[in-house]
Structures are given as structure tokens and as C-alpha cells.
Image (cartoon, coloured by chain):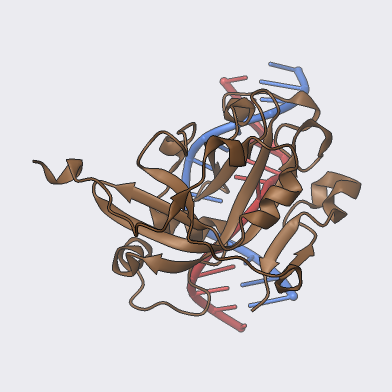
Chain colours: A brown, B red, C blue
Amino acid sequence: MSYEQQPCTLPSHWQILPAAFYEREDVVQLARELIGKILVTCFDGVVTAGYITETEAYEGVTDRACHAWNGRRSNRTEVMYSPGGTAYVYLCYGIHHLFNVVTNKKDIPHAILIRGITPLVGVEHMLARTGKTKVSQTFGSGPGNVSKALGIHTRHTGQSLINTPEIFIASDGTSYPEEAIVAGPRIGVDYAGEDAKLPYRFLLSL
DNA sequence: CATAGGATCGCCT
DNA sequence: GGCGATCCTATGT
């Protein structure tokens, strides 16, 4: 058996989130619920995973901050119109690969940007990918750093988070009380006018 | 075809 | 707190 075909082995109590989770309508509620879930990647038999600590909701065609605002479609954003549970990865500032989860039904382009993780599995691989020697306080903080640590690339855009073994999200039962999660305006969306003020960013306050 | 700007990061002062 | 890196995408001619 080749090394590349080794399956990922995960703790047996982890539940991979099903399509029904992602297909729900309220993307803001979903963004809140993703805090504490585990984002997992498995590329060439290398498993890395981290607890999601920060998210932002992008509410489709009515949200000026969303790439699909006003029904915009392009080669890049077409993936946002896929069914919930699809990866939307795009390049930002020519350098950073930003990972989003598409939600809601097909043709409703909602998405959630994953902005931060706490390393959980495969820390040594994450350190190698990021060129670091130890996990600092800011390791895994920022959407560009999330993708770098987990090995996520724009080539993965359009992948299912349900049917493919490479990228998915799991729950180990961890949950937080309302007051442990703070909401605030999204980062770097000043161009969105009034929508820039919406409290669509969620952050674990620990 | 040309061009402006971006859902950022890390290093510098 | 400021700024350069770096290249794709969207938009306009």
C-alpha cells in the first residue's frame, strides 16, 4: 500500500458534520455554532486539526461584504452557489489562501470564513508548514494562517466537506455558553458601507 | 488588453 | 501604528 493511500484515523467519538448541518438557513447562527468544532485536513496521509476559535458569516446576495452580493457570479465565486458543505477557498492579497464553508441550499451563496484555530492534531506538521519552531500565542490566528497551518490551498476550492476525505469538520461534543462567544463587526470590510457594522464575527473569549 | 484593489501578515519603527 | 509583499480577480475600454 502506498503512503498516499493511508486512510485518516480519528478519535472514535468525533462526529463528522453531515450535510444537514450546513444546509440550514441561518448562516449567522451557523457561524456561531462552528466555534469549538474541529477543522480537519488529511493530505497524503498527514492529519492536522484544530478547534475553530473565530468565524465570520457572509450572508449572500443581500450582504455588501459578501463576494456574492447582488447575485454576482464569476469563476472565483461560482463555488459559493454550491450546496452547503462545500469548501470555498480563494487567494487574498496575492499571498493568503482563505478558507470558507459554503452554507444553505444550492444557489443560495452563504459562506463562513474561518479566521482562527487552536492546534489539536499534527502540531509538528503545522509548525513545518508555517516555518515555526513552537506554537506561539498567535499561532493559528488569522484566516491566512489557518490555511497555511492546515495545508489548505486554492486548489481545494469546490471540494465537498462531506464526501471527500481531505477536508471536513467534526464535533467532539465541545460546546460553549453564549457568554463565552463574543460577536462584533467583521474585519477588513470597510467597503461594505452599513453592512460593515453587522455583528457577524464570532470569537471565543477565553 | 490594462489596471486598480483586496474577507492579510509580519516586520519595522 | 505603518507599510511592503505579491498576484488574482473584477471591471472597464
Image: A41 above or below C8: below
Residue under the point 24% across and 45% down: A7
Outermost residue to the front: A13
Point out residue A191 in the picture as x, y percentages from the top left corner.
81, 47
Quadrant housing residue A5? top left
For the point 48% across and 61% down, the residue is: A172
Q: Which one is nearer the viewer's eye here, A157 or A108? A: A108
- Indicate the position of residue A143 as horizontal and vertical percent values: 56, 57
Viewer-side residue, A114 vs A33: A33
The residue at the point 60 percent across, 34 percent down is A84
The quarter in which the N terminus of chain A is drawn is top left
Left or right: residue A121 compared with residue A97:
left
Image location (x, y in percent) of residue A186: 75, 56
* In the image, farthest residue toward the left: A1
Return the residue nearer the eye: A29 or B7.
A29
Rendered location of residue A80, percent (x, y): 62, 31
Farthest right residue?
A194
> Which residue corresponds to the image point at 82% horizontal and 57% vertical from the top-left?
A199
Assign the C terminus of chain A to one quadrant of the image: bottom right
